[in-house]
Image: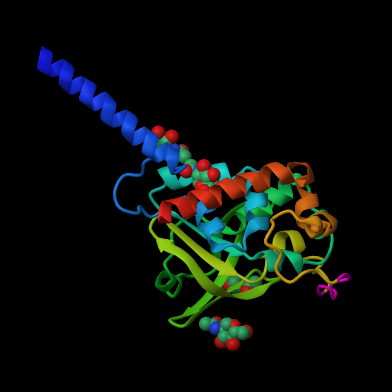
Amino acid sequence: MASTTTTTIALVLATLLALTISGARGQPAAPGPSPAPRNLTAVLEKGGQYNTLIRLLRATQVEQQINSQLNNSFNGLTVFAPTDNAFNTLKAGTLNRLSQQEQVALVLYHVLPRYYSSSMFQTTSNPVRTQASGSNGVYTINVTSTPSQTNISTGVVDTPITNTLKSDFPLAVYSVDKVLLPYDLFGSKPPAPAPAPAKEKPDKTPTTDGPSAATESSPSAAVGLKGRGAGWSFVVGVGVMGIVGSLL
Ligand SMILES: *[C@@H]1O[C@H](CO)[C@@H](O)[C@H](O)[C@H]1NC(C)=O
Ligand SMILES: *[C@@H]1O[C@H](CO)[C@@H](O)[C@H](O)[C@H]1NC(C)=O
Ligand SMILES: *[C@@H]1O[C@H](CO)[C@@H](O)[C@H](O)[C@H]1NC(C)=O
Ligand SMILES: *[C@@H]1O[C@H](CO)[C@@H](O)[C@H](O)[C@H]1NC(C)=O
């Protein structure tokens, strides 16, 4: 009896100590040495140039959907991540013209309902189904791939995969330099080529929600994110601190 109590007290103390340490590092105690995060947002934050996509994922609540799918899916997921620059070079108002439902479809169009390593793309037959759908059914992309390069075609946009951010079942995340515009939403009236930027912008703004994002019209305005800017910057800050903390 006494020894059971002692053991219990020791366990409680050990737990408290562990909680204190993990609290000080701003991270829940993670099991095992550096577990690969299967958290899309964490992968994108680490990439550093996917802030618009992260905001869209949040605003459309696709982030939640993806995280729970990653948890439950036998097939995994593949995500194409357009850079902030890809969103910036969209013709002004491109996203604003979409209904909320179409904005969700646009985001889901960047998600494939299974995990593809880059070698798996070489054996995929076209068209490849995405997670987006509309009145005409499931939206698709075409993929052409060699060992050295993978190209994606939507029928409106052609772009290569430029970088692998993560490829580790169940999650693959590939960087692309263009927003994948679904043929079903943009095919009948292909958007004019993006005009030269009207205003010179600072090259790389470190903030996620600087004045340029607010005046820039499309991505943030489209999903009514302006009001959330401050809160979101805070979340990003904490997230980055978390990542940095986990590396220390
Ligand atoms: C995923 O990562 C983000 C940013 O690091 C974090 O805010 C979020 O809570 C994480 N979600 C899950 C389900 O772990
Ligand atoms: C993942 O699944 C576990 C167990 O099924 C559950 O407790 C947890 O909340 C899930 N996490 C997410 C992000 O859905
Ligand atoms: C990808 O597209 C580029 C540019 O159009 C082309 O040069 C290249 O051959 C394509 N690669 C594949 C694997 O289709
Ligand atoms: C995609 O591939 C299918 C099958 O090869 C083809 O019929 C279709 O025209 C292609 N679409 C585009 C947009 O390249």
Against 206, residue 158 (above or below) is below
Residue 133: tell me if it is visible.
no
3 to the left or right of 100: left
What's the coloring here? rainbow
Q: What is the quadrant of the N terminus in the image?
A: top left
Q: Residue placed farthest to the right in the image? A: 198
Residue 92: tell me if it is visible.
yes
The residue lying toward the viewer, choosing from 209 and 221, is 209
120 to the left or right of 196: left
Q: Quadrant of residue 80?
A: bottom right
Q: What is the quadrant of the C terminus in the image?
A: bottom left
Q: Quadrant of residue 3?
A: top left
The residue lying toward the viewer, choosing from 105 and 172, is 172
Q: Residue at x 27, y 31 (%)?
A: 14
Q: Residue at x 63, y 49 (%)?
A: 57
247 to the left or right of 86: left
Q: In the rendering, at what x and y percent does residue 92 appear?
A: 84, 63
Ligand 3: which quarter? Answer: bottom right
Q: In the rendering, at what x and y percent does residue 225 appear?
A: 75, 46
Q: Residue at x 45, y 47 (%)?
A: 70
Magenta includes 13? Answer: no
Q: In the rendering, at what x and y percent does residue 158 appear?
A: 65, 75
Q: Residue at x 76, y 69 (%)?
A: 89
Characterize the magenta stretch by its predominant secondary structure.
loop
The residue lying toward the viewer, choosing from 7 and 83, is 7
Q: Number of numbered discs present?
A: 0
Bounds of the magenta span? 193-199
Q: In the rendering, at what x and y percent does residue 43 appear?
A: 50, 57
